[in-house]
Amino acid sequence: MLIHPEHLAKQRGAWSLGAEVEVPAMRACSPITGFTLFIAEKPKAAKAIATALFGKPLECRRQGVPYWVAYDSGRLCIVASAAGHLFSLASLTNEYPIFEYEWVVRWKVERGSRHLRKFYSLLEWLSKFEPKNVINACDFDVEGSVIGYNVIRFILKRRDYFRMKFSSLTEDELARSYRNLLPPDANMVEAGLCRHELDWIWGINASRLLMDVYREALGRRRVLSLGRVQTPTLVEAINRFVADVVEVAEPKYTVSALLKREDASETFSGVHENSPFEYKHEASVAKSMILEAGVGIVKRVHIEKGERPPPPPFNLSDLQGEAYRLYGFSPYKTQKLAEKLYLEGLISYPRTESQRYPPDFPHAKVLERLKLLDYASEVGYVFKVNPGLKPREGKKMDPAHPAIYPTGKRPGRLSEDEKKVYDLVVRRYLASFMDPARITRLKALIAFKGQHVIAEGLNVEWRGWTRFYPLDIAERTIPLLREGDRVSVVKVIVREHWEKKKSRHTRASLLQWMESNSIGTESTRAPIIETLFSRGYLKEEKGGIRPTKTGLVVCDIASKYFSALTDASLTREFEEMLRRVRMGLERREDVLERAKNTVRALVEEAKSRFEDIKSTILLYEKTSAAKRCLVCELPATHGLCHIHEKALESLVESLNNLIRRTNLSREGLLSRIARNRKHGKAVREVATLILKGLIRLE
Ligand SMILES: [Zn+2]
C-alpha cells in the first residue's frame, strides 16, 4: 500500500498546501505548526535520512542533541531521532508473579541511561509545535517499529503516523521509501511489544526469585538473571562443556603408504581401504602385508568431475560465521561492525535472515558503483560470467529485508576491522554472481595381494568464484594412474591418532545452535550470548567456552527448579507464536496469556522449593574445603564433583576396551591419557588422580 502524506491529507481535505505554512525567508531551527516530523532510530541515521531527502538540511541542536531542518516543496520537515529505546518496561508491584507492568521513561529506571533524557526532551519540545505528519523512520524491523511507536504514542501522544521502509541508508533507497510511505506497521509493532512483554514477564519473575533466594542464602545482593532465551542458551553451552571435558577419546590407526609407479620416480601417498583401524595390531598386520607384497596393481580408477557453487549472499548469521572463521571475530563484534557500516551507508541493513534479493533489485547499479571502488576486476568478471546478473541465492527469507549487500558508496576512513567486514560483504555479494569452481577427483584402488590401498587426488580445474572470495580448496596431486599399472611401495607407516566427538561451543557455534533451534532473532542472539559473559556465567578460553562457578549454580538451579526455562522447545514454541503475531495470525494478548500461565506455574513450582534452591546455592557457595572436589572447587559427594564423577565413569567404562585396542598396560594407558590433550580435561585430571593413587579403581 502506497500513501504519501500529501495525498492522504488531500483525500481528507485537511491539508491545503502553502496557505497554512508560510516559508520564512530565513532558515531557522524553530518548528512551525504543521510541519512534518521524521523520527529516526539514531542521530547518525537521522542525518543520513535528512541529507538523502533534502540535500543540505540545516543542522540544529538543542541541549547538544542534533536534529535537521529542511523544506520540501515549501513544507517544513524536521528529522529528529531517538537513541534506541527511550522507554522500557517496569513493574507496578512486587508481588509474585509480577504481571503488572507499564512502559516507563527509560532514563528514570535504568542506570547508565541518563543521556536519553536530552533526546526525550527534544522530542517533547518538538511535539509542542504540533507536527501535522509524523513519520516513523526507525530501522525497519520489530525493534525499530517499537522504538518509533513508543515515541509517537507517549511523547507525541498520537496514533496516526506513516512508516518508512528502507534497507539501506542510501539516497536512492531513502528517496524511494519517502515517495512510498506505508501506513502504520501494526503487526510489527504488536510483535515487537509482544516480544518485549514476553521476555520481561519471564525474566523479571525468574530473575527476581533467584536473586531473592540468593540474598536469603548468602545475606548479600547479587545481580543474576534468568531469561526465556538466555537460560536455554546457557544450559546448552554448559552441557556441551561437560560433554567435552568428560569424553574419553578413541584411538584410531591409519595405515598410509608412500608409493610410486614402477616406471616413474615421483612418489604419492595412499591409505589402506580399512583405515582408520580400531585396533593397533590389525593396523600392524595390514602394514606388514603391504610391505611383504612390495608391488601392487592398479585395479580400478575412478575420475569424478564436480562443482563447488558460490555461496549465497550473507544474512547476519552467515556473516558472523565467516567473520569468525576468517578473523576470529565474535558474533557480537561482527554485528556491531556491520551496524556501523550500515549507519555509514556502506552496506544494507545487516539484521536480516534473508539470503535472497527481490526480483527487481538494481544489481547493475550496485555493481557499476563497486566497479569505481577497488573492485573493478571482480565486477568485470561478474559481467563476463553472468551478464544476466542473476545471483545464486539461498533458501532463507526475511519479510523485512533482503540479504546484505554493499551499497557501492565510497567508504571514508574505516578501522582495520571495519575494512575486513566491509570487504567480506562486498566479496560475498560479488561471489554470488560468479561461476562455480570446478574440481576433478581421481580415485585409484591398488591391490597389494589381498590388501587394498586407495590413492586420492583432487585438482581444482577452474577456480571460479574462489579466485575472489577467501576460500581455499586444498589440492592433492597424484600421478595419472591407469588400470593395470604397477605400483611399488616406498614406505608404510601406521599413524595413531585419538578421535574425539564432542567439542565445546565457541561464541560462533553457540549462535549457530540458537539459529538452528529457532530461538532468539537475528538482532538478539549475539547480545544474549554477550549477556551470559557479562553476567559472569561463561568464559571463553582457548578450547572454547567454559562455565564459571556462578554459571554452574544458575544452570543447576534452572534445570532442577525452573524446568520450563531450560526447555529449548518451549522457547521455540513461543518464537513461533511471535512470528505468527508478526504475520497478524495471532493476537498479542493470547500469547501473553499463555506466557503468564507458564510463568505462573514456574513461579509456583520454584516458590514451593525455595528451601531446596537455597541449599543448592549454599552447597556451591559455602562448601567447606573438606567437601570440595579433589580436583576443582565444586561441591563433591564422594570426593568428586558431578563433572569429575562423570569423567571417572566414562574412563572406567572405556578402560578395558582401550587396553585391548592400544596393546598398552593399564598404567601405560593411564599415563598416556593423563598427558594427551585429545582427551577431555576432566578425564585427564581423573587419570592423574588414579596414577597418584588418590582414587582407587575397584
Ligand atoms: Zn570437580
Image: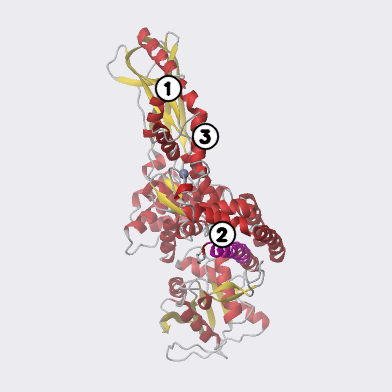
Q: CA distance from mark 3 to mark 1?
A: 20 Å
Callout 1, which amino acid?
Thr
**Residue at position x 65%, y 61% in the image:** 607
Query: Residue 648: which numbered mark, if any?
Result: none
**Splitting the image into 4 quarters, where does residue 141 fall?**
bottom right
Sequence order check, earlier mark of 3 and 2: 2
Which residue was labeled with disc 2?
226
**379 relative to 659, above or below:** below
Which residue was labeled with disc 1?
662
In this rendering, which labeled residue sits more in front, label 3 or label 2?
3
Please tell me which residue lies in front, 279 or 26: 279
Q: CA distance from mark 3 to mark 2?
A: 31 Å
**365 relative to 79, above or below:** above
Q: Which class describes the residues within 10 Å of circle 3: few (<14), some (14-19), or many (20+)?
A: some
Q: Quadrant of the N terminus?
A: bottom right
Please tell me which residue lies in front, 168 or 682: 682
Sequence order check, earlier mark of 1 and 2: 2
Which residue was labeled with disc 3?
649
In magenta, the rendered stretch is: 196-217
- Residue 96: x %, y % from top left: 66, 67
**685 relative to 659, above or below:** below
* Colouring method of the image: secondary structure
- Residue 113: x %, y % from top left: 47, 74
Q: Which class describes the residues within 10 Å of circle 2: few (<14), some (14-19), or many (20+)?
A: many
Looking at the image, residue 289 sits to the left or right of residue 191; the answer is left
**Residue 212 shown in magenta:** yes
